[in-house]
Amino acid sequence: MILDGKIVAKNKMDIIKENIDGITDKYKFTPELKLIQIGNDEASSIYARSKINRGKKLGINVTLERFDNIPKKMLIDKIKDYSIKRDINGIMIESPLPENLNFYEIINYIPFYKDSDGMTSYNEGNLSLRNEMIAPATARAVVDILEYYNIEERNASIINRSPVVGRPLSMMLLNRDYTVTICHSKTENIKNITENSNIIVVAVGKKNFLDESFTNKNSIIIDVGINYENNNVYGDADYNNLVDKVKAITPVPGGVGIVTSTDIFQNFLNGLDYQLNNL
Ligand code: NAP
């Protein structure tokens, strides 16, 4: 079975739009998501444009402020300024940042309820307390795909331990009674672990990393990897070889990535809701 991210994303977009429409009608304003980009990274510009377009479809005003470079203090002051503005409801710092700026240090100036990326320490930490109001969008996307397709298996291995994927996802799966094994570059016998898991989440950033030797016929593969080669995008799983040999698999493109782009707006909506009801 192909786990089609486009269908999951479309379903989520419809639900988010309905909620934003309701808020716009009730409070008579268009909510705003502020993107801050420093530098000229091409992939980062493409992601920013795609957020602007997705925002248009949802009735959210997504605005981009770009700097060639900016002193750290000025950037922090800017974030503090947007943090108290009531008409700005979400703030995202586009990565990568120039080397003089530490992403995780900078984003922690964003209040948790405006953290649409879901990556601040507060929101990452809250996952371990079963509070998922705002969660790293990629981890949320994996959960959304498993839930949309009613995957009943509860034994998962994740090949990744980053704060973007593996760490938050392990908490979110634990919150749903999964038994989770996290693997990384120092893990021995990864194939033994994945072969004995029902669900394999792979996010190592290496094309064709996950081949048949990691899987069995009942494997459910969630491919988070994004690898660019000759203007094409590939996941981490050897999709063409695996698609007929495993129980289910997400394609790349059209899998986790498109759901992640939508889940940024799920975070935005949840944060907006918090702002309207609590501040
Ligand atoms: P990252 O911080 O570099 O993490 C990569 C992880 O893979 C690390 O935990 C690393 O282990 C592990 N790894 C690398 N080589 C390995 C090997 N040979 N065996 C086992 N584990 C290995 O990257 P990231 O930010 O988490 O992103 C990972 C991938 O997901 C990238 O391809 C990225 O583009 C993609 N991504 C996709 C989305 C989406 O929406 N689809 C969103 C975000 C990221 P160590 O910790 O030991 O180094």
Image (cartoon, rainbow, N blue to C red):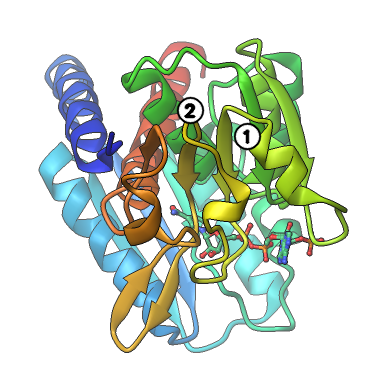
Residue at (38%, 68%) from the top-left corner? 234
Image: 6 above or below 93: above
Q: Which mark is residue 58?
A: none
The percent coordinates of residue 110 (x first, y second) are 61, 46
Ligand 1 quadrant in view: bottom right
Discs 2, 1 touching: Cβ within 8 Å? yes
Quarter of the view holding residue 166: top right
**For residue 33, side relative to residue 186 (left or right):** left
149 or 278: nearer the viewer = 149
The percent coordinates of residue 168 (x first, y second) are 67, 36
Residue at (67%, 81%) from the top-left corner? 71
Q: Which mark is residue 143?
A: 2
Residue at (42%, 18%) from the top-left corner? 151
The percent coordinates of residue 204 (x first, y second) are 62, 61
The percent coordinates of residue 65 (x first, y second) are 38, 70
Report the amino acid beneath label 2.
Answer: Val
Q: SS for tag 2? A: helix
205 or 92: nearer the viewer = 205
Q: Which residue is mark 1?
A: 169
Image: 200 above or below 240: above
